[in-house]
Image (cartoon, grey):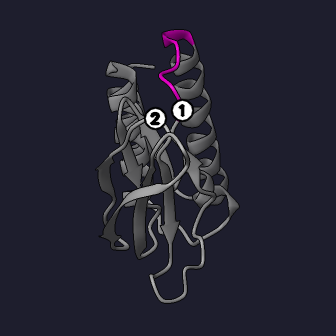
Amino acid sequence: MKNYGKLISVIAVLIGLFVMSVSVSAADLAIIVVDGKAVVGNGTSGVAIVASYDEDGKLTKVVKEYVTESSSTVLNVKNGDKVMYWDGLETMNPLSDAVTVTDVISDEDKETIYEAAVDKALREALGKNKGKDMTELQKHWHFTTGL
């Protein structure tokens, strides 16, 4: 759990420091599900949606939260829920791939997912900012992660 707080902090810093346009890389980080919570947002205004289903696959509940360019939203989710991120309710164009919440994963798998997400986010941030002063990002990275 401690590591996921670090991951969310790193992602928040990266989004805050860099204006991200909707792209494959930004879409990959738009929905993160950890321990019954879905964090939705990637620097693009839109609508986060959680659809819940019963055992027969029948839709039982829909929750929607608006996301702004400078914020993310955190939604409660459970096994079987589908989390989506659209540009709006009228157009319903996806801003990322939908995520279906699955059973709780092992601590080892959580660590692997965390490390891969942090590594990818940092590589993308550094790659998009070649030639720029990255001192502040690196200081925050070391302070936040202890690495």
Mark 1 surroundings: few (<14), some (14-19) or many (≥20) residues within 10 A: few
Q: Residue at x 55, y 49 (%)?
A: 57
Q: Residue 59: where, in percent of width, then height? A: 46, 58
Q: Measured along the vertical axis of the image, is residue 77 above or below residue 14?
A: above
Instruction: Tell me, yes or no, whether the highlighted magenta stretch contains residue 72.
Output: no
| Direction from residue 24 to residue 42 in the image, left or right | left
Left or right: where 25 falls relative to 67:
right
Mark 2 in CB contact with mark 1 (< 8 angstroms): yes
To which quarter of the image does residue 89 belong?
Answer: bottom left
- Kindly identify the residue that appears in the image at 34 percent across and 20 percent down: 1
**105, 54: nearer the viewer:** 54
Residue 64 in the figure: left or right of residue 80: left
Q: Which mark is residue 102?
A: 1
Residue 56 at what x, y percent from top left?
Answer: 54, 45
Residue that protrudes farthest toward the front in the picture: 56
Question: Is residue 138 visible from the viewing direction of this image?
Answer: no
Q: Earlier in the sequence, mark 2 or mark 1?
A: 2
Residue for point 64% across, 42% down: 123
Label 1 sits on a secondary structure element that is: loop
Q: Position of residue 105 (x, y in %)?
A: 52, 19
Where does label 2 land, which residue? 79
Three-letter code for the amino acid on which mark 2 is drawn: Asn
Point out the residue furthest to the bottom here: 90
Residue drawn at x 34%, y 69% as measured from the top left: 67
**Front-most of 144 and 116?**
116
Which residues are the magenta region? 102-108
Q: Main secondary structure of the magenta part?
A: loop
132 is higher (above) or lower (below) than 2? below
Residue 100 visible at all: yes
